[in-house]
C-alpha cells in the first residue's frame, strides 16, 4: 500500500495497513506501468472513442527491450521477446533456428527484480526454483489478467439523478491512482423479487469475469444522496482492485486489506448510518 495510491491515508494508518497486510503482499497496479491495455469495444450509452478490434496493448518499448537484452545476455544468443495480454498462457518460449522466442504477459514488465531474475532463469535454464517464483507472481497478480467474458449488454452509466461514470472516474483518480481504469460500470436491471424470499436488496455487485460493476437502479432517485451512491461504487471498485483471498477450500471476499481500506474511506461511517436509517424505504424498490 502506498501513500500515492491512497492519498487520504495518514502515515499512522498507513502503518496499520502494512501490519494488517500478509507478509510479502503488495497492492500492485492492475496493469503494468510500462504497458497500457485498451479493451475491446463495448456498447455504451455515449459516443466511444475506443478503437475497434482488440483488446490492444501498447508497450513501453524500452522496458521490453531491457528484458529482451537481459535474456539475450543469459543465453548468449539472439532473443525475440513479445509482450501479450493473453488470458491463459502467461509465459511461453520456443527455440527456432538458434533464436529463443519468448512470449510474456505484460504483468512482467514491472515485476520486482527478484521475479525478473527468476523469469530469466526459468526461461533460459528451466530452473525449478525459479519456476516457483514465477508461478507465485502469476498467482498473486491474476487480477491483472483481462476479463474473460465480454459485456454483452449496453452499459448505462447516466441515470436520471446520478452519473455512475463520473462517480467511478472521480474515485479511481482520487483514491486509486488510476489502478481501476479498466473497470466498467452500469446501472443494473430491476428484477421482481422471488416469492418467499427474505426482504433484502443488493445495492451493488462486481463481476470479475467482465470487470463490471452493477449498481441497483433503486439508487437512482432524487432523495438518495450522492455520497451514498459514491460509497456503494467505492465498495465495488475495491473488489476490482483487491482480489479475493483463498483460504483452503473457502474464498474470503473481504480480506483484511479490503476491510481496512473500506473503513478508511472518508464517507464510510456516514454512508452506513444513512443506510441504516433508510433501508426499509430502499426495500420497497427492490
Image (spheres, rainbow, N blue to C red):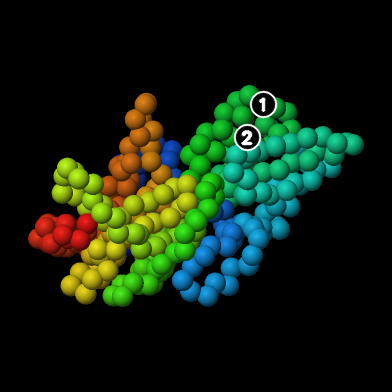
Which quarter of the image is occupied by the C terminus?
Answer: bottom left
Residue 201 x %, y %: 22, 53
Q: Nearer the viewer, residue 15 or 154?
A: 154
Quarter residue 18 falls in: top left
x 47%, y 63%: residue: 154
As helix, strand or loop, the secondary structure at mark 2 comes to helix
Residue 256 x %, y %: 30, 42
Q: Residues within 10 Å of mark 2 (few under 14, many from 20)?
A: many
The residue to which callout 1 is attached is 127
- Count of numbered circles on the image: 2
Quarter residue 184 falls in: bottom left
Residue 45 x %, y %: 46, 71
Distance in Å between CA atoms under marks 1 and 2: 8 Å
Residue 21 x %, y %: 35, 41
Q: Residues within 10 Å of mark 1 (few under 14, many from 20)?
A: some
Work out whether residue 15 can be spotted.
no
Most extreme residue toward the front is: 195
Q: Where 229 sits versus 84, above or below?
A: below
Quarter residue 220 falls in: bottom left
Instruction: Please report contact status of discs 1 and 2: CB closer than 8 Å, yes or no.
Output: yes
The residue to which callout 2 is attached is 118
Left or right of 124? Residue 11 is: left
Q: Nearer the viewer, residue 116 or 44?
A: 44
Amino acid at each position: 500500500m502506498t501513500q500515492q495510491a491512497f492519498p487520504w491515508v495518514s502515515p499512522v494508518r498507513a502503518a496499520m495497513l502494512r501490519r494488517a497486510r500478509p507478509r510479502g503482499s503488495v497492492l500492485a497496479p492492475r496493469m503494468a506501468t510500462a504497458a497500457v491495455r485498451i479493451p475491446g469495444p463495448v456498447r455504451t450509452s455515449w459516443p466511444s472513442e475506443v478503437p475497434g478490434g482488440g483488446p490492444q496493448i501498447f508497450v513501453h518499448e524500452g522496458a521490453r527491450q531491457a528484458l529482451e537484452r537481459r535474456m539475450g545476455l543469459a543465453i548468449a544468443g539472439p532473443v525475440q521477446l513479445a509482450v501479450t495480454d493473453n488470458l491463459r498462457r502467461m509465459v511461453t518460449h520456443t527455440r527456432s533456428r538458434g533464436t529463443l522466442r519468448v512470449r510474456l504477459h505484460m504483468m512482467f514488465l514491472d515485476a520486482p527484480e527478484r521475479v525478473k531474475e527468476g523469469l530469466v532463469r526459468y526461461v533460459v535454464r528451466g530452473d525449478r526454483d525459479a519456476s516457483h517464483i514465477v508461478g507465485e507472481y502469476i498467482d498473486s497478480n491474476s487480477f491483472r489478467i483481462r476479463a474473460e467474458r465480454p459485456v454483452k449488454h449496453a452499459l448505462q452509466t447516466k441515470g436520471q439523478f446520478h452519473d455512475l461514470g463520473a462517480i467511478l472516474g472521480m474515485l479511481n483518480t482520487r483514491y486509486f491512482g488510476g489502478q481501476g481504469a479498466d473497470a466498467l460500470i452500469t446501472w443494473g436491471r430491476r428484477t421482481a423479487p422471488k416469492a418467499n424470499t427474505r426482504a433484502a436488496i443488493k445495492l451493488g455487485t462486481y463481476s470479475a469475469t467482465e470487470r463490471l460493476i452493477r449498481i441497483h437502479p433503486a439508487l437512482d432517485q432524487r432523495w438518495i444522496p450522492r455520497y451514498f451512491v459514491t460509497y456503494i461504487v467505492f465498495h465495488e471498485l475495491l473488489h476490482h482492485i483487491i482480489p479475493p483471498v483463498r483460504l483452503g477450500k473457502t474464498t474470503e471476499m473481504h480480506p483484511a486489506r479490503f476491510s481496512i481500506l473500506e473503513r478508511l474511506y472518508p464517507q464510510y461511517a456516514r454512508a452506513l448510518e444513512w443506510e441504516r436509517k433508510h433501508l426499509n424505504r430502499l426495500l420497497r424498490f427492490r
